[in-house]
Image (cartoon, helix red, strand yellow):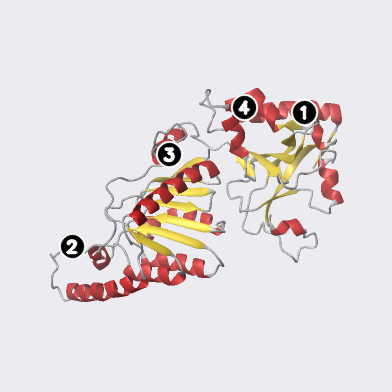
Amino acid sequence: MSINLISKGFGEKFYSLLDSTEDQINIISPFIGLKTAFGLAEWIESLDNIKCCIITRFNREEFIRGASSIEGLEHLVRAGAKLYALQDLHTKLYIFDNHSVIMGSANFTFNGFYKNHEFGLYMENENDFTKQCQDYFDGLLNKLKSNGDWQISLERILKERQYVNISVKNLKGKKGMNEYNIAKWGAVLNDIPQPAQPNGKETDILEDAISDITINNRKTGIWLKFEGTSQERIRNDEIYLKRKRRINEYVNRTFFPKKPTGIKAGDTIFLTVVSKDKDENEVPIIIGYAEAKGFTENNKIDDSDSRYLKWNNRFPYYIEYTNGKFLNDNIMYGISLNELYRELNHKVYPATVNQPNIRLENIKKRHHQKSHIQITEIAKEYLIRKLNLLFEKHGYEEL
C-alpha cells in the first residue's frame, strides 16, 4: 500500500487527484469554504455524469463567522452535488473514484488547503484501501439517511442565507458581538459505522493507515508497469520491442489511463506484460527494465499525433524511459509475476515487507486493476539478477 504523509500542499494534492477522477468524488468535511466550493462546482459543471456527494455541518454560527460558507453550499447544490447535514461532525475525508484517498485534519476550505498547519495522509492508486474508506462513507451516509431527511436542499440554503445575511449585518453594526447563535440543523448519530471485516470485527480505517506508515516509510522509486489488460492480453509469442515497432508505437514510451504523477525522473520501471506464461496461465510477465524520465503535464497523446492509436483513447498519458534493456525473445520466457510472489512472498511490496504472515492470495491481489505499482529494493535485486540470466540465454536489446 502506497501511504504518504502530508503536512502541506493539501490543495495541490486534492486537485492533482481530482484531475484523474472520472466518475465520483465523495467528501466528508465539517467546514466548506467559498473558494474551494466554487472551484469544485466549476469542475462538476464541466463534466458529464460526474457524481459528487458531501457530508458536512449546517450550523448558523459557523456561517455567520465565516468558518463555513452558505454561499459555497449554494454553488455546490446548483452544480448538482448532493449535500447532507450531520451534527457534531469532525471527520475530514476525500475519496476519488475507487483509486485514491486523502484524510487528515484539513477542512474543505482555502485555509485548510493552503494556509493552516495541517497533517494527514494520502493514498494514491490504492484500490483496496480506497474501498475501505468508501465503505466507511457509505455506512455513514446510510445511517444518516435512515435517521431522517437530512439532504441539504437549495430551498433550505436560500432561506438560511437570509438569516445569515441579517446576522452578519448586525455584526458589522457591532450588535450582538458576544452572542452565539445556537441554530443548527442535521442528523444526530450516537454511533458512527465502521466498515465490517470478513471476520466480523470492526476496524478503524485511520488506525489501519497509520499502522502502515512504519511499513512504508519511504518511496522506493521502483515500479512494475503493466502493459495490456486482462480483457486484451498481449500474445505470449510476441517479442516486446518488435511488437512495438510492428504496431507503429513509440518504443521508449509506456502509457497510463490516469496521470502517473508518482513516477519521478530516475525511477526504475520493470515493463510487465499482461499475457500468459509457457503453460498458458494468464499472468503478467516481466520482460525488461528501464530508467524513467518522469511525468510532466505535457505527457499526453492526442489525435494530432501521427502515431496515435485507437487504444490511446483509454491510455492517454505516458512517460518516456531510457537506458532500457529488454528480452529479445518471446514474452513467455520472461519472469512470471507468480514466480516473483512465490520466491519473495511478502517482500515484494513495501506495504507487506514487514508482514511475514500475510496470505499469498492477498499479496497477489495488490496489483489488480492497477497500471503500475511500487515494489521493494529486494524485489528489484531479484528481478535484475534473474533478467540478466534470461538475457544471456535468450538475448536482449538495449534502448
Which residue is depicted at the point 85% across and 38% down? 237
Residue 308: x %, y % from top left: 77, 60
Which residue is depicted at the point 17% across and 75% down? 170
Q: Which comes before the other along the chain, label 3 or label 4?
A: 3
Left/right of residue 173 with respect to residue 124 in the rendered view: left
Depth-wise, is mark 4 or mark 2 nearer the camera?
Answer: 2
Q: Secondary structure at mark 2?
A: loop
Mark 2 burial class by Cα count in 10 Å: few <14, some 14-19, many 20+: few
Residue corresponding to mark 1: 388
The reply to whether dot 3 and dot 2 touch (C-beta < 8 Å) is no
Mark 1 burial class by Cα count in 10 Å: few <14, some 14-19, many 20+: some
Q: Which comes before the other along the chain, label 4 or label 2?
A: 2
Residue corresponding to mark 2: 182
Residue type indicated by callout 2 = Ile
Viewer-nearest residue: 379 or 278: 278
Depth-wise, is mark 3 or mark 4 nearer the camera?
Answer: 3
| Quadrant in the picture for residue 269 | top right
Depth-wise, is mark 1 or mark 2 nearer the camera?
Answer: 2
Q: What's the distance in space between the residues labelled 3 and 2, CA to CA?
A: 36 Å
Q: What's the distance in space between the residues labelled 4 and 2, CA to CA?
A: 58 Å
